[in-house]
Amino acid sequence: MQRPGTSKRLALLTGAFLSACAAGGAPAGERGPRGELPPRADFGAYLVGRFAAAETDTRAAADNLLKALRADPEQPEVLNRAFLAALLDGRPEALRLARRLPDNTTANLLLTGSDVQAGRWDRAEQRLRAK
């Protein structure tokens, strides 16, 4: 039997540990021509977001996955997970992210619903027929 709050403590501990590991920086061979570090994703936020999603903590999942997406906006896996987390938490960012996911059925349905709400019936019909 798990004690109350154990899951959240474990998620925070995991995030802190991974953030500390990521803060160590890249080895000297991975540095750019002027010695600066390459851009990298926020791995701690990504893993905490995944854990929170598995625990159905939609707020923490969305917060952390959106943070990870800001660190690496072109990563498709992070984009998909951040979209779903934002959608499940009812955040307006989900609509913005849906526009970046043309092959995602859930994103397409969200965009169709947005078109219907705005009275763009032709566009909504086109979206439904395209898929």
Image: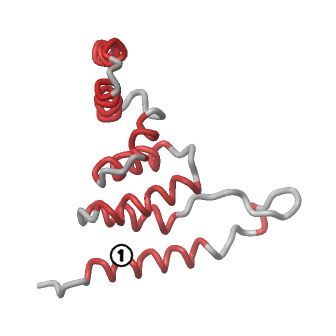
The scheme the figure's colours follow is secondary structure
| Residue at 65 percent of width and 76 percent of height | 24
| Residue at 47 percent of width and 56 percent of height | 66
Q: Is residue 31 left or right of residue 124?
A: right
To which quarter of the image does residue 12 belong? bottom left
Q: Is residue 69 above or below residue 57?
A: above
Q: Position of residue 74 (x, y in %)?
A: 57, 43
Q: Position of residue 47 (x, y in %)?
A: 42, 65
Rendered-image quadrant of the N terminus: bottom left
Q: Amino acid at mark 1?
A: Ala
| Res 43 visible | yes
- Secondary structure category for the residue under label 1: helix
Q: Which residue is mark 1?
A: 11
Residue projecting furthest to the right: 34
Q: Is residue 127 left or right of residue 73?
A: left
Q: Is residue 69 left or right of residue 52?
A: right
| Res 131 visible | no
To which quarter of the image does residue 19 belong? bottom right
Q: Is residue 103 above or below residue 129?
A: below
Query: In this orientation, which residue lies closer to the viewer: 64 or 78?
Result: 64
Q: Is residue 108 above or below residue 54?
A: above
| Residue at 39 percent of width and 28 percent of height | 103
